Amino acid sequence: MRTTLSRYRNIAPQHWRFLANRHDRPFIDPDLGITGLHFNLSHTNGLVTCIVGAIEEIGVDVERRDRDGGLDELAHVVLAPPELVRFTRLPRAAQPEFFFAHWTLKEAYVKARGMGLSLPVREICLDMASPQPTISFATPIDDVPSRWRLWSLRPTEEHIVGIAAASAGEPMSLNIRQSCFIDQN
């Protein structure tokens, strides 16, 4: 993370300092005098993802797509009622892809908000029918759906990445800067 941030500001990796909000979301220590630079990080077996931007409300999540243990139980906890209906109608083999596409976007959203799982994820509903997913909220979540841009990516055969960013009303784009494999052997 430090090396990545050093690509955006002239600070040596070892000089970055971080704090965390009450929900444990890390952010750059304001005493460094850095403005307009925000980040979020996620990892799972085999992949680390990082998002960096000028927008404070950005979030990323990554999961393995080949995991299906306990998805029936998790689906009832994570998916909004309309999503759960769609999930249960899918063939068993298609359920993990559906679940993790939704889960990673929801997790990216709650991370972008800086509130983690204190937000009720069942009250977040995603529409993945178009290339640009959209989001809607039930009453307990005080937010405006139109300000969010979402991306669902498949960087490898095994992984799915969800990205959420709050828009300031202007068009947004996603640029993948670097991707590399680090052999741990």
Image (cartoon, rainbow, N blue to C red):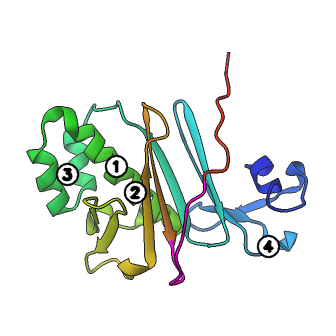
Q: Secondary structure at mark 2?
A: helix
Determine the residue positioned at 14% across, 53% down.
86
Q: Residues within 10 Å of mark 1 (few under 14, many from 20)?
A: many
Between the residue at mark 3 and the residue at mark 1, the CA separation in whole angstroms equals: 15 Å
Q: Earlier in the sequence, mark 3 or mark 4?
A: 4
| Disc 2 + disc 1, Cβ < 8 Å | yes
Percent across and percent down for residue 14 are: 88, 49
Q: Secondary structure at mark 3?
A: helix
Q: Amino acid at mark 1?
A: Ala
Q: Residues within 10 Å of mark 4 (few under 14, many from 20)?
A: few
Of badges 2 and 3, the one in the foreground is: 2
Q: Secondary structure at mark 1?
A: helix
Q: Residues within 10 Å of mark 2 (few under 14, many from 20)?
A: many
Q: Amino acid at mark 2?
A: Leu
Determine the residue positioned at 80% across, 47% down.
3
Between the residue at mark 2 and the residue at mark 3, the CA separation in whole angstroms equals: 17 Å
Percent across and percent down for residue 104 are: 40, 51
| Disc 2 + disc 3, Cβ < 8 Å | no
User: Where are the magenta residues, as a range?
Assistant: 166-175
Q: In the rendered image, which residue does mark 2 sit on?
A: 105
Q: Is residue 86 left or right of residue 101?
A: left
